[in-house]
Image (spheres, grey):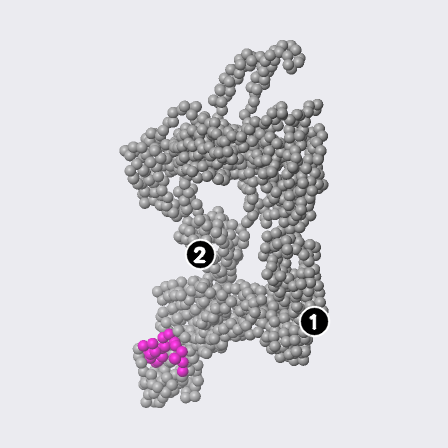
Amino acid sequence: MPEEKPAAEEAPKDKDEATPAPKEAPPEEAPAESPKAKTPSEDQSPTAEEPTGIFLKKPDSVSVENGKDVMISAKVNGKELPGKPTVKWFKGKWLELGIKSGARFSFKETHDSASNVYTLELRIGKVVLGDRGDYRLEVRAKDICDSCSFNIDVEATQDSSGPVLEEFKRSGDAKSEDAGELDFSGLLKKREVVEQEKKKKKDDDDLGIPPEIWELLKGAKKSEYEKIAFQYGITDLRGMLKRLKKAKVEVKKSEAFTKKLDPAYQVDKGDKIKLVVEISDPDLPLKWFKNGQEIKPSSKYIFENVGKKRILTINKCTLADDAAYEVAVADERCLTELFVREPPVLIVTPLEDQQVFVGDRVEMAVEVSEEGAQVMWMKDGVEMTKEDAYKARFRFKKDGKRHILIFSEVSLEDGGRFKVLTNGGQCEADLIVEEKQLEVLQDIADLTVKASDQAVFRCEVSDAKVTGKWYKNGIEVRPSKRITISHVGRIHKLVIDDVRPEDEGDYTFVPDGYALSLSAKLNFLEIKVEYVPKQEPPKIHLDCSGKTSENSIVVVAGNKLRLDVAITGEPPPEVTWLKGDEVFSAKEGRTRIEQRLECSSFVIESAQRGDEGRYTIKVANPAGEDVASIFVRVVDVPDPPEAVRVTSVGEDWAIIVWDPPKYDGGQPVTGYLVERKKKGSQRWMKLNFEVFTDTTYEATKMIEGVLYEMRVFAVNAIGVSQPSVNSKPFMPIAPTSEPRHLTVEDVTDTTTTLKWRPPDRIGAGGIDGYLVEYCLEDSEDWIPANTEPVERCGFTVKDLPTGARIIFRVVGVNIAGRSEPATLAQPVTIREIVEQPKIRLPRHLRQTYIRKVGESINLVIPFQGKPRPQVVWTKGGAPVDSSRVNVRTSDTDTVFFVRQAARSDSGAYELNVQIENMKDTATIRIRVVEKAGPPMNVMVKEVWGTNALVEWQPPKDDGNSEITGYFIQKADKKTMEWFNVYEHNRPTHCTVADLIMGNEYYFRVFSENICGLSDSPGVSKNTAQILKTGITWKPPEYKEHDFRMPPKFLTPLLDRVVVAGYAAALNCAVRGHPKPKVIWMKNKMEIREDPKFLITNYQGILTLNIRRPSPFDAGTYSCRAVNELGEALAECKLEVRVPQ
């Protein structure tokens, strides 16, 4: 009678299929272990693993014919991911398929927004044998990562199998399958042809490896085969080696190079790199090339010779060095590529705002972190290019790390917002262009001169660059021997020497480019000399003369004052000058007296403020005397304003205040000019172009959070003063808005707890904290509750009078000051509020709370009530056992904690929360469960045909949980290998069908509850024997033979020599009954569950597979077989050689 083969022997040996459990001992010695993970069902094929983690559908392992297309798909649950996933496909362990994306490998990713499911697809076109192997899909999303593996098997086409099968047939014409004989002669003939075709095809088979890889393998050393196979994703290493061995191609070694350049190099910009090549003959000439051009030695390129090594060092790599490099020795060449990585260009010094006038030269400069970096200039969002520079009036300039935009003569159209962009940042600035306004600082004065004297017309304007023309009676004046025209700084002069009567007229100065003219008149004074023979008293010829005369002259500080006083008298009088009451007689110096015939001059060079005063001239001769007084008033620009300070700031504004200057320059101060700048900058920006008369100014349009400085100029009729001392740096910052949602959280007899939310607007100044204030209902005096701001949005005000009605308010505080207050709408009565106790039982505790034995129990149950209630836990009316249960109670919740739960912790617990005579109670039911015991009295009740009825009784211990079902298995008495029959069987009996006739079966049953299957099964005490129909079995009348024997090795272990990196196997055969226990040892140390070793036992044939052995794996290996009758030992030596 043929024996039944276990399903495990019939199933294909695929890694995705389940393997059967090892053979069992007799029923009474059945191991107590859960079978779900180890024993598949006999009648079911292995099923795919249930999706876990983020995968809704994992990729399936496939088998595809060579040359056809294949598509692998998977689905990912987007609800488990925090964002869009990053998908990577790998072949083997590390080879990423993304680098092979192209004609054969394509990837697709779709997203269903309705179900939030990502569908991932990998498509391989025209697969080759080199594509077979293990693959892996990896999905990442922030800190979540999951992966799964699958296999692709590529099968060769089976075109020649048909003719062979046609020859494998019986001879004769009979239709019966038993008639005729097999025609082996035809089969053998055909087999020779098929073998030749297979051999030819096998020789032509290249395993799907591209030709360039074969050429690389042919030129490589044997020790590099594994590295190349790993690099290019070749998984069939054994087939590749056979193919290389059969090719028998002589590897053509390089005659010139013993070590070539790497395929590519990478270097950061600014760093140096070395390209190293090793040649076979140090006397051979060598040349280096860059993009086909020979490289000559320089400070940039340095050549070095170290033995047989030739080194090219490239210093300070730039983007121009990103090129293809080549080294030539004799007729051989070696190529590589150099990639220069450019670091991000950061902005070190950004653009600054500028305010200029039309026609000025403007330079907008920005400094970046790298020299030679590329930057983009934009104006009002539009890129500025060199092509536009020819049309517009600007140009670009690079000065090391500085990039400059230059306007030679700026116009109104050039104003706008400019932006500079780099690959590492950007900056912006405003260019404000205004029309230039020319101011007249000193007008031309009318002149009255005598013949042969000098006439000087002088004027001063605000711009030193302004040119102009002089006109006389509308006709332009040209320079000559007598007429001199000069322009020094802001001063324009017209000097006429040896004045003649024809020089009299109206003279005008017209500045170029301005609708402005300055006019004055030249009067010619004719002097008539009459002879008076008699004496004449002296006479001073001024507008006002005599002792009571008054005459006033105003001179601008820094200008020259010349007082020419005409004097008459006969004989010529003696002249005396006095300043105040002191006689002044100096003839040289800044202040001096010049005497001429009939004229005395008092000259002051560069008038100063101390020159102001009353000057008196006295003339006397024998005929009499005359006196005249002249008051000289020196006017100047005022002193700078004083005490410039910022009194208040806002979000984008500031109030600036200053004191008037102590000295107004002799002229009333007409107003002030205000400027500001960012701290650290050197460019000041005017805030007003029209003079501001008040001493308080509000500056606007500032950026919150930026430090500014201010200064003020005073203006009078003479000009503008020097700038004042800069104000202290200040920052425009606004107080926050008022806090929101101010509410009362709790009230006691002496305290009130408030809570609120942060303000809607905080600003750049941030918020330092909050101040709480309160006042009595009938009072207006606010009392601070805290002196230091509190950071959190809550505060408890203490020491309040009981029974008082108090109003509370909260203000936010930052560097800008206090915000608007948030005030409670109604006053709060300070009185304890009695709140009835109430237990807020969580929803999951309203039903029985189930935990497993050994797990912790941690229950947090909130409650409410005022004042603080008393909390009591009880079980069955008695307090809980403090040695088992830890209870912690706060003002708002109570915690019930058991570190390791036991069955005794099950039961109903009562929680009592009580305040005086008010009470609330809750019941929490806890059940601690564990695995159930094995079923009782498993028996085979009835056998009919190929069916058997198995019954049992429930287990004595249900693990404190309901029995949810039973798990039934069967085993043939001969093999004692267990196979699944039923899962989750609810009744305590079952009918097992489709048993094999002639076999005898044992049955075992596991109990199942909420914790899983029981640790041990209940095994049937009798067996079910399936008899053949019409045949009855009679027990033998002779004495049964004793087949027991001690272990004996039929085939011993043999010494082996293997190559490192290639799988090795040690084989032997053993016999013994009962089945012996096999122990493998290395150097007399037992080999346990090591992933490097795989141990198999197939009907006494023992195999130890060693995965990719290394020299460390060499040694003495032994196999020991032990049963109750004895033991046997086999040994061998394993030598692992490393290929040279």
Report which residue position mark 1 lands on. Answer: 916
- Residue at disc 2, secondary structure: strand
1029 up-or-down from 630: above or below: above
Kindly identify the residue that appears in the image at 36 percent across and 85 percent down: 578
Q: Quadrant of the N terminus?
A: top right
In the shown orientation, is residue 408 left or right of residue 743? left
Question: Mark 1 is on which residue type?
Answer: Glu
Q: Residues within 10 Å of mark 1 (few under 14, many from 20)?
A: few
625 or 1111: nearer the viewer: 1111
Residue 899 place in picture, x, y as percent: 58, 57
Kindly identify the residue that appears in the image at 56 percent across and 69 percent down: 790
Q: Residues within 10 Å of mark 2 (few under 14, many from 20)?
A: some
Report which residue position mark 2 lands on. Answer: 348
- Residue at disc 1, secondary structure: loop
235 or 878: nearer the viewer: 878
25 up-or-down from 654: above or below: above
Residue occupying the far front of the picture: 1038
908 or 218: nearer the viewer: 908
Question: Which mark's residue is nearer the viewer, 1 or 2?
Answer: 1
Residue 471 place in picture, x, y as percent: 44, 65
Q: Is residue 333 magenta?
A: no
Q: Which residues are magenta?
A: 589-613
Q: Earlier in the sequence, mark 1 or mark 2?
A: 2
